[in-house]
Structure formats: C-alpha cells, structure tokens
Image: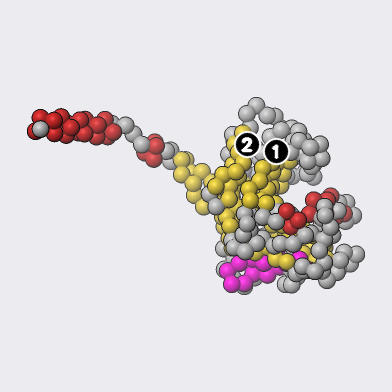
Amino acid sequence: MKQKLLLVVIGVVCLCVQCADTPSSSTTADVEQVLVWSDDFNGNELDQSKWTAIVSDGCPGNCGFGNNELQYYLDDHKNLSVSDGSLKITALKDGFDSKDYTSAKLISKAKGDWQYGRIEVRAKLPQGKGTWPAIWMLPTLDRQMKWPRDGEIDIMEHVGYNQGMIYGTIHTEKYNHVIGTQKSDSIYLDDASDIFHEYELAWDQNKMVWSVDGKEYLALEKNNEDYEGWPFDQPFHLILNLAVGGNWGGKYGVDDSIWPQTMEIDYVKVYQNNEI
C-alpha cells in the first residue's frame, strides 16, 4: 500500500515540474492597451473639446442624409443634454423647418480620430417603430469623402421595428448594402431599451471584432483585400445619432404615438495598443 502511494506522489511531482516549465499565455504578451480618449458625461453640459453637434437635415447636398430620414438635427437642450452622468440624445415629433421631427447627432471628427483601437460605448437604446439609433464611424479625410469607397464602420445599429436586434456592419465599395454585399451580423438583446449594454469594436490592421457585453458576434479579417474591400487602414472618427424613419428605420412606417424617444450614453472609451 505504501509503495503504491509513493508512486502516485512521485507522479504528481513530475507533472507539476512539467507545468512549471511551460510558459502561460499571460507571460508572453508583449502588447497592452491604454486608454487614449474617453468621455464619461459626468458634467452638466457637452464637452465641446470632444464633440461637435451637427445642425442640419443634410440639405442641399445630401437631403435626408442619403437615407430619406425624417429628422432635423439640432443643437438644442431638448434634443441633446448631459445630466446625471449620461448623455441623452432625444428625438421628438415637434417639427423644425420642413421636417416633422427633431433629434441630435454628435461627431468626434478632428477632436477624436483613431487608426485602430478598441472602442467601447455603454448605451441604452430607444424603442418603437421608426427609431434608428446608431453608434458608428467614418474616415477623417483631408478631402471630400466618397461613400462607400472610403468606408463606414457601424459599431451598433438598431431599428425599432425589429426590437432588440443589434447589428454590426461594414460598408465599402466592394461590400455595401446598395449592391447587397455588405458584411454584417447581429445579436439579440431582449432588454436593449431597458438597461445599458456595452457595445464594442476591436480593430487592428488585420481584423475587426464586434461584441456586446464581451460576447463576440462578428469578426472580419482583412486577408488580401485592397482599398475597395478594406479602406480601414486610416483614421476614423466616432458618430452618435438617433435618426427617425428613413430607408431602413422607417421601412414599416413610423409610429407617431411613441415620441419622445431617447438614446442614452453612459460613457465612450477608446483604447489603443502600447508596445511594451
């Protein structure tokens, strides 16, 4: 009995020595990510060093922002406010100029522009037919953008007629919804309009990965794509907006009884690699 026990103990010791000689993945990492840009919306007003509010309906050059959207974006406290630790973007059926609805749209262009990184946005979404909130990115260029050739990254889109379905998508000259080739996937959240969720894009020179609350649902690799298929090796900026109606958001009409509706943002954080 004693001999058998001794053999077991020796076996365990040998196994442990072998484990000690095998390096773990955490000890071989040579890159860490550091926070390079953020907004926690803890004040009482928008930080204009980080955001620009768009005031427009897209006209005359891009009426309805290319999607036949029904809102006029305003820089007005009723549509855009910061309070109690969050940003509120609110769409109302109150009318302005020739539009029946007003809302808000923020861009970080020339104030927050990044080539690669991990973008995290914690948000609670509006609901109801006709709502179309989005967290997305466009390239920061020194010339006029050519869509879709120059690229678009949709970190999160939601349309109220398909409540709870969260979409991540890219648009390029080769892959876009106009020709039905867009690369996209979705994940379902039954409480997307009830509680905050973290929407994330991890983006580097080889790959983009979309996740919600740490759960990955879409991964795209560059492979051998040229600019027509992967125009993402250049700086992009962030956009937060709540549209009304439009080609997608209004596909099944707009419910006029639901307004106002609000997209609430708890924070935005951007991390980039720090070589160590």
The residue lying at 67 percent from left, 39 percent from top is 232
- Looking at the picture, does residue 56 appear above or below residue 214? below
Say whether residue 141 is left or right of residue 85. Answer: right
Quadrant of image for the N terminus: top left
Locate residue 275, reporting x and y percent.
47, 40
- x and y, in percent, of residue 269 in the image: 56, 55
Q: SS of the residue at dot 2?
A: strand
- Image mark for residue 93: none
Magenta-drawn stretch, dominant element (helix, strand or loop): strand
Q: Is residue 105 visible?
A: no
Mark 2 in CB contact with mark 1 (< 8 angstroms)? yes
Q: Which residue is mark 1?
A: 183
| Amino acid carrying mark 1 in the image | Lys
Residue at left offset 71%, top offset 33%? 229
Residue identifier under label 2: 220
In the depicted structure, whether residue 23 falls above or below residue 47: above
- Taking the view exactly as shown, the residue that stands out farthest to the top is 224
Q: Is residue 136 left or right of residue 60?
A: left
What residue appears at the point 59 percent right and 61 percent down from the top-left corner?
196
Q: Residue at the left extreme?
A: 2
Q: Does residue 272 appear left or right of residue 50 in this picture?
A: left
